[in-house]
Amino acid sequence: MVFQWHCRAAHFALLCALLCGCLPARTTGGDVTSTLLIGGSKIDVTIESGEMRLSQAELLHWVQTAAEAVATYYGRYPVPHVEIHIIPVHGTGVRHGQTFGYDGGLIKIRVGKQTQAAELGNDWMLTHEMVHLSFPSMADEHHWIEEGIAVYVEPIARIQARQMSAEQMWADLVRDMQKGLPQDGDRGLDHTHSWGRTYWGGALFCFVADVEIRKQTHNEKGLQDALRGILNGGGDIRHDWELVEAFKMGDGVLAAVRRAITGAQLSKESSSEGILPSAVFAGRSVADFRPRL
């Protein structure tokens, strides 16, 4: 009878964990590993051994919050499975993070042992690292696009998930975007590997692309649509792509909207003025009207 009760209690605990999106923790060599379920994706979170002021629950909530922001922006979590290793270090605050494409996806991030929960609430770094999962791996000279997307998308994802105010994002962009502008001797994003050009130069590229897409699609689409298209087309961190391949995939997502806009305009002018659609482009090549990312 006692054994039967323990079995039922264990099953009930497992069911509660599944409904809450968190599987029970397991310990391996002093490390504690838990599993979060975000949509259809599995996130294994390993808290490496070491004394920390933060509780396991607080750290898991931090991971879940970042994952929900990224899933909100992309419509789903970028990869089916990812391992996140939280590494305790001396001091306070969230420290250096790294994201890798092997083994399905791996993020290593360092957290100060004296960090408090309020500091996690203001953190951007884990969301930044998770955004890296959503774009294919590039050659070294195109590292700026990987970092630029992560810098640009991170605050927007958090705003869409109601984790950050738009006012804060725009204030930060006004303050920091200038760090990405070319300086004397600049040789372009592919050949200027300074911190400012790689991170904020890449973010500036994304910002301009977002504005141009919205202008040319009458605000029907934005960079978010292109990035979702790249991800849904198989372009995540587990795969190596050429940059032009990613751009073509993203541009293809916008093609239908461009055709719909120009098609509607042609139909309106044809019916109202009684002219053939081809007359609208008289004296110009169709290529002149093709938006580019």
Image: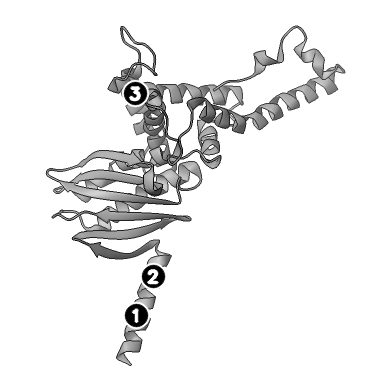
Can you give x and y, in whole percent of width and height, for residue 53 in the image? Answer: 15, 53
Residue at image location 21% in from the left, 54% down from the top: 48
Between marks 2 and 1, how big is the CA–CA gap?
11 Å
Q: Give the quadrant of residue 216.
A: top right
The tag earlier along the polypeptide, 3 or 1, is: 1
Identify the residue at image location x=71%, y=11%. Answer: 285
Query: Which class describes the residues within 10 Å of circle 2: few (<14), some (14-19), or many (20+)?
Result: some
Give the mark count. 3
Q: Nearer the viewer, residue 279 or 133?
A: 133
- x, y percent for residue 237: 42, 39
Residue type at the position of mark 3:
Thr
Quarter holding the C terminus is top right
Q: Which mark is residue 16?
A: 2
Q: At 28% from the left edge and 23% from the top edge, which residue is drawn?
A: 195
Spatial separation of the CA atoms under disc 3 and disc 1: 53 Å
- The nearer-to-camera label among 3 and 1 is 3
Q: Secondary structure at mark 3?
A: helix
Q: Circles 2 and 1: CB distance less than 8 Å?
A: no
Give 119 or 255, whichever is nearer the viewer. Answer: 255
Q: Secondary structure at mark 1?
A: helix
Q: CA distance from mark 2 to mark 3?
A: 44 Å
Residue that numbered label 1 is attached to: 9
In the displayed structure, 3 sits above or below 183; it is below
Q: What numbered label is drawn on residue 198?
A: 3
Name the kind of residue labelled 1 in the image: Ala
**N-term-proximal mark, 2 vs 3:** 2
Q: Position of residue 141 (x, y in %)?
A: 38, 22
Frontmost of labels 2 and 3 is: 3
| The N terminus - image quarter | bottom left
Residue for point 38% across, 36% down: 154
